[in-house]
Image (tube, helix red, strand yellow):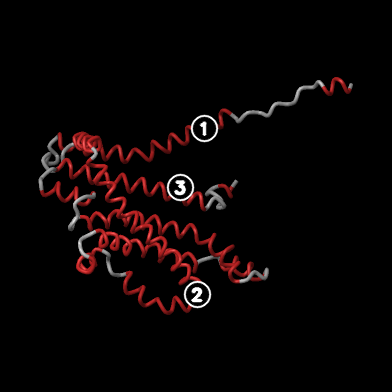
Amino acid sequence: MSTLTAERPATAVPAADPPHRLRRAGGLLLTAVTRSVAIAALLALWEVAPRLGLADRTFLPPFSEVAREWWTMLAGGELTEHVEASLIRSGAGFGLAVLVAVPLGLLIGWYRPVADLLGPLLELFRNTAALALLPVFVLLLGIGETSKISIVLYACTWPILLNTISAVRTVDPTLLKLARSMGLPAPQVFRKVILPSAVPTVFTGIRLAGATAILVLVAAEMIGAKAGLGYLITSSQYNFAIHRMYAGILTISLLGVLLNQLLVALERRFTRWRTPAGKDRA
């Protein structure tokens, strides 16, 4: 009997359910198709409208012609040069804004005296549009790189700062009471309760700032720049190079989408502890 038991083969671990895997793959495919329908319809309308005379082809060339010009500029290296210049400027301003606004927002949201001291100043500047201050930045800092990076820093600071302050102030009071009832000191409460709870809202502000960084920089590059996507669009408009102008606009849209997806991936990495929607209803 013992010999038979010893020679008995181990039970194989069942493989994943094939129908379940097929359903999951089908769901992902359906999601991708659904999200692409609107974009595909817009591009199709862009392609057809000039060819049917619904729009002036001189001012709105078909998408295929713009895409061909975009590829030509990319292959020739010209588009890469403009993208690199814009990414360096926007990346510097955006990175500085994150380094300044996140700690400052945590400080203002956690310590009431700091909030009372800086509150009026924040209310004054947050309602002043960044582009309205662009001439001031140019006058004070010149038309070089410093003014462009500074205007991006100023514009990106506010969505990050305000979302960080809101994140700290809207932490679940029950969690705070529970942590304090366990005798945790204030630094431990801040590190173990406040920070994890604030991360999703902070990343919302960072994502908003990422889009703002590109948009504000494009406007800043239209003044006194010799490279960058804003310069490319403005110079193409002045020279009536319409295809190049739309190629620059498309590039800005692609950069915005890529940056948002990158920030979404980072947010998911830092908030892996959260329960995905629908999981708690099982």
**Considering only order in the chain, which callout, 1 or 3, is on the residue closer to the N terminus?**
1
Picture quadrant of residue 91: bottom left
- The disc at residue 111 is 2
Residue 123 in which image quadrant: bottom left
Q: Position of residue 214 (x, y in %)?
A: 30, 53
**Is 50 positioned to the left or the right of 2 in the image?**
left
Quadrant in which the N terminus is drawn: top right
Q: Going from the N terminus, do you reach mark 1 or mark 2 first?
A: 1
Query: How many other residues sit within 10 Å of disc 3, few (<14), some (14-19) or many (≥20)?
Result: few
Disc 3 or disc 1, which is closer to the eye?
A: 3
Relative to 98, say whether 14 is above or below: above
Q: Residue at x 31, y 40 (%)?
A: 39
As shown in the figure, which amino acid type bears the numbered disc 3? Ala
Q: Mark 3 points at which residue?
A: 265
For marks 2 and 3, give the CA distance: 31 Å
Location of mark 1 (residue):
23
Q: Please give left or right for residue 164 compared with residue 245 in the image.
A: right
Q: In the image, which is nearer the foreground, mark 1 or mark 2?
A: 2
Q: Which residue is at 33% across, 69% downward?
A: 126
- The image's mark for residue 276 is none
Amino acid found under the numbered disc labelled 2 = Tyr
| Residue at the (23%, 66%) spot, across then down | 141
The amino acid type of the residue labelled 1 equals: Arg
At which x and y percent is residue 81? 25, 44
Q: Which of marks 2 and 3 is nearer the N terminus?
A: 2
Q: Is mark 1 on a helix, strand or loop?
A: helix
